[in-house]
Image (spheres, helix red, strand yellow):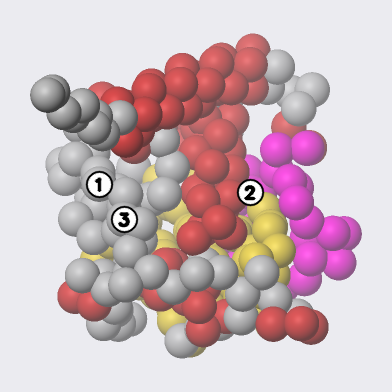
Amino acid sequence: MTTRRSVNFQPVRRVVRTVIETFSGIALMKIHVILGRPLRNWRTTWGTTPSERQRAYPGDALLPNPCWSYTHGVTVDAPPGQVWPWIVQIGQGCGGFYSYELLENLVGCRITNANQILPHCQNLEVGDSIRLHPKAPPLTVAMMEVERHLVLFASDAQSGDSTVWGFHLTPEGSGRTRLIERGGSTHGESLRSRLTFGRLLLEPISFVMSRKMLLTIKALSPVMTDSV
């Protein structure tokens, strides 16, 4: 009598899903780069109301005259206390960026996106560094109010490059949260600065990554997974 061996297809499904998501991300980036100007207003205001876009947020004063900026938002079906742990562990070497992991690793980010709360990445403080890439200068935690605001900032006086990246949580009724991502950049006069921090490439590409990130946080936050 022979016994039928069960086969676990879960790892294969994960690989297939990752590959499909990666090619989808690449396709979206191409579309947004090609249609940069026509889609710009939609990209830079995605998911937000006029009042949210006009509102002042902590960190705005760090970059008062950005060359380009954006305000994105999602509604999360969880209170701020369940959203915050995912935000505070963002970064290379911690929770990753909840976006297109394979794409990030193809450019050497060495990212592993967490699907759990990581206790060792929860003790963030003002002045700490958040890395986007192991070889790139880090962003610094410029402002933080637990369960409300996290603002990251980097500036290079020599090149004229600066960037601010903020996450802002506002409680809503029925235990929900508005998660607002506001950021912007300015650049120097060199070609390298314009390509790296200018809106021509960075704005459409970062939008695709940010949208994926916000939607992933939206999906993860309602159920607090077991810590590792």
Question: Helix, strand, or loop for circle 3?
Answer: loop
Residue 116 horizontal/vertical position (percent): 33, 64
Q: Is residue 43 rendered magenta in the image? A: yes
Residue 87 horizontal/vertical position (percent): 44, 67
Relative to 145, 74 lies left or right: right
Question: Helix, strand, or loop for circle 1?
Answer: loop
Local packing at callout 1 (Cα closer than 10 Å; few below 14, some 14-19, many 20+) is some
User: Splitting the image into 4 quarters, where does residue 228 fall?
Assistant: bottom left
Relative to 80, 52 lies left or right: right
Relative to 12, 174 lies left or right: right
Q: Which residue is mark 2?
A: 69
CA separation in Å, label 3 and label 2: 27 Å
Query: Taking the image as drawn, is residue 74 in sight?
Result: yes
Quick one: 31 or 60, which is closer to the camera?
31
Q: Earlier in the sequence, mark 2 or mark 1?
A: 2
In the rendered view, would you say 42 is above or below 150? above
Question: Helix, strand, or loop for circle 2?
Answer: strand
Q: Magenta region: which residues?
A: 42-71
Local packing at callout 2 (Cα closer than 10 Å; few below 14, some 14-19, many 20+) is some
Q: Which mark is residue 114?
A: 3
Q: Give the amino acid at mark 1.
A: Thr
Residue 216 horizontal/vertical position (percent): 51, 51
Q: Are marks 2 and 1 in contact (CB under 8 Å)?
A: no
